[in-house]
Image (tube, rainbow, N blue to C red):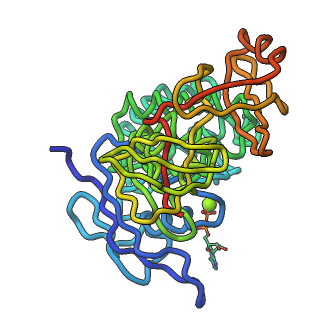
Amino acid sequence: MDKEILTVENIDKSYEKKLVLQNINFTVYENDFFFILGPSGCGKTTLLRIIAGFVEPDRGRIILNKKDITKTPPNKRNIGFVFQNYALWPHMKVIENIAYGLKIKKYSEEFIKKRVKEIIEIVKLEGVENLYPSQISGGQQQRVALARALVINPQILLLDEPLSNLDAKLRDELRREIKRIHKETGITMVYVTHDQKEAMTLGTTIAVMKDKEIVQIGSPYEIYTNPIDIFVASFIGEINILKGKIVKREGDLLKIETDEGIFFVKSKKQINSENVSISFRPESAVSEEKINVIKGKLHDYEFYGDIVKINIITQKGNLFKIGVYTRDFNKYKKEENIIFSISEDKIMIFEQ
Ligand SMILES: Nc1ncnc2c1ncn2[C@@H]1O[C@H](COP(=O)(O)OP(=O)(O)O)[C@@H](O)[C@H]1O
Ligand SMILES: [Mg+2]
């Protein structure tokens, strides 16, 4: 049984009269890389600040290692925090920024020296120890912020959109670095982001937030393949949507009428209404004429290098996005009619 590190229980928070967090519940286990993923303004930063103790909730409890810390001041919580804007002290050298948390805890000079050296190796900051934050790159500044949070050996590390101020290439590099640091140190992390790519590639568990609430918690695979609703489905990746009506049910197999014809969908989901939306991801479309066939013409395309995403327009005027390998794309360009099908277990179904 995995060890529980952090439990967030029934958290509500309002600012003035406006509710910004509603009944937030989740548990983070040892070594988890737990993601809170949601659009801007949904309450992610407020939630992270409540866990860290910078903001007080109106209701609910925060449990860290079986201890109720809801009323514990931030500096007594043994939690590391990495801010979006790094928040380094500009008048302190890199090494002083990193050592600060240990200095105020009054560790011996000798211990501090040893521990800081260790952390500098982990985050790969050798050579810039004696520079000031203004003299190093954004990527290095974020490494300092990570080091400063890790140096106190916290029980849990909270990160608030730590890569959002970096350009795309640095973001990819630091994303891999954070993954490595998580693996090497084994520290439990809670990471807040609006970027589904970060959550999918790093996370062991993702909690998807939508407007002050958590709507689904699961592994990246579960969330991607079995999203609870269309919001989650489209936030975590691309989808095609088609409205329809269930006309026959045979166990797991549903027969659905749409304006693109009949579709068969295999689903274990409990669907109570007859009016549904069916949905599939671009990569679920295969170029063969089997079950669940859609026919159309090439409308336009997006070239990604390895793959091309093509939009197909049907006679009824519906657009469907499918992904094809670049090496096969010439074939599609020449084709008058593009035909593809989606296997019955690759179609997601949602109540309308
Ligand atoms: N100190 C504050 N006072 C009033 N409203 C706030 C404060 N902090 C955040 N909010 C509001 O709470 C909501 C959630 O904000 P935030 O937690 O920053 O979301 P996110 O990090 O997901 O973008 C927003 O509507 C924001 O305007
Ligand atoms: Mg935020």
Residue 154 locus on image (x, y percent): 36, 49
Residue drawn at the location 63% of the way across and 58% of the way down? 39
Taking the image in four quarters, ligand 2 sits in the one at bottom right
Residue positioned 53% across, 71% down in the render: 212
Residue at point 61%, 43% (across, down): 261
Examine the image and state in which quarter residue 307 appears. top right
Residue 118 rendering spot, x and y as whole percentages: 42, 29
In the rendered view, does 313 fall on the left or right side of 208?
A: right
Q: Is residue 226 left or right of residue 135?
A: left
In this view of the protein, can residue 251 be seen by the observer?
yes
| Residue at left offset 68%, top offset 21% | 324
Q: Work out whether 347 lies above or below 278.
A: above
Residue 317 vs residue 179, the one in the foreground: 317
Q: Residue furthest toward the top?
A: 327
Q: Residue furthest bottom?
A: 17
Percent coordinates x, y for residue 182 in the rendering:
42, 34
Q: Is residue 35 above or below residue 126?
A: below
Give the answer, above or below, for where 228 lies relative to 214: above
Q: Say which of 115 and 223 sits in front.
A: 223
Residue 222, located in which quarter of the rendered image?
top left
- Residue closer to the observer: 320 or 131: 320
